[in-house]
Amino acid sequence: MEALIVYDSSDGNNRKFADAIAHRVQKRFDSIKVKAIPQTNAQDINSCDVLYLGSGARGLLFFDKKPEKTWTDFVTSLPAFEGKKTVLFTTYKFSASGMFRNMKEYLHPKKFKIIGSMKSRLGEVNYQSFAVLKYSVNY
């Protein structure tokens, strides 16, 4: 089985979170690739069994966070991936309120199968994230 961790990271925290995710799931997959959005294409996504897809949160201080433009442009450019098992992740400074709802709005027309979401303030895997990761490798 192969995992692909794709991230957009303007401040380095999502890259740190992507690396932490890879470290936590490495024993459960035959292959793990960690890639920034500019180095990722549709074939990469097509060939993985589980996709971890992350973006930083932008927007008002505490309300209705949205994914970065690099992330939304990337997702919009993708073909449909019906049933592709996907875990969303984000890092934030103050709040991630509304972030996953907004990410899902972009992914819904592409028919990704969202099986979980994780957030981190400092790019570290916390207890909740660990539970999502455990679920994602056993799904």
Image (cartoon, grey):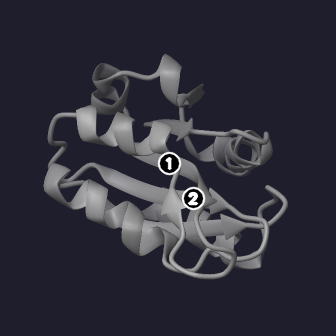
Is 3 situated above or below 138?
above
Residue depicted at 27% across the width and 30% down the height = 46
Residue 139 left/right relative to 32: left
Dividing the picture into quadrants, the one containing residue 45 is top left
Is 70 situated above or below 132?
above
As shown in the figure, which amino acid type bears the numbered disc 2?
Phe
- The answer to the question of whether label 1 and label 2 lie on touching residues, with beta carbons closer than 8 A, is yes
Q: Position of residue 29 (x, y in %)?
A: 55, 39
As shown in the figure, which amino acid type bears the numbered disc 1?
Tyr
Q: Position of residue 88 (x, y in %)?
A: 49, 59
Please tell me whether mark 1 or mark 2 is closer to you in this view.
2
Which of the image's four quarters has the C terminus? Answer: bottom left
Disc 2 packing (10 Å; few <14; some 14–19; many ≥20): many
Q: Position of residue 8 (x, y in %)?
A: 59, 39
Q: Residue furthest front?
A: 60
Name the one closer to the observer, 116 or 15. Answer: 15
Q: Secondary structure at mark 2?
A: strand
Disc 1 packing (10 Å; few <14; some 14–19; many ≥20): many
Is 132 situated above or below 1?
below
**Tag 2 residue:** 89
Residue depicted at 19% across the width and 54% down the height = 83
Residue 64 left/right relative to 58: left
Dividing the picture into quadrants, the one containing residue 102 is bottom left
Name the one closer to the observer, 55 or 41. Answer: 55
Q: Secondary structure at mark 1?
A: strand
Task: Give the distance between the C-alpha atoms of the residues marked 1 and 2, in whole angstroms.
Answer: 7 Å
Say if residue 36 shows up in the picture: yes
**Tag 1 residue:** 52
Specify which label sits upstream in the sequence, 1 or 2.
Answer: 1
Residue depicted at 47% across the width and 43% down the height = 69
Residue 61 left/right relative to 93: left
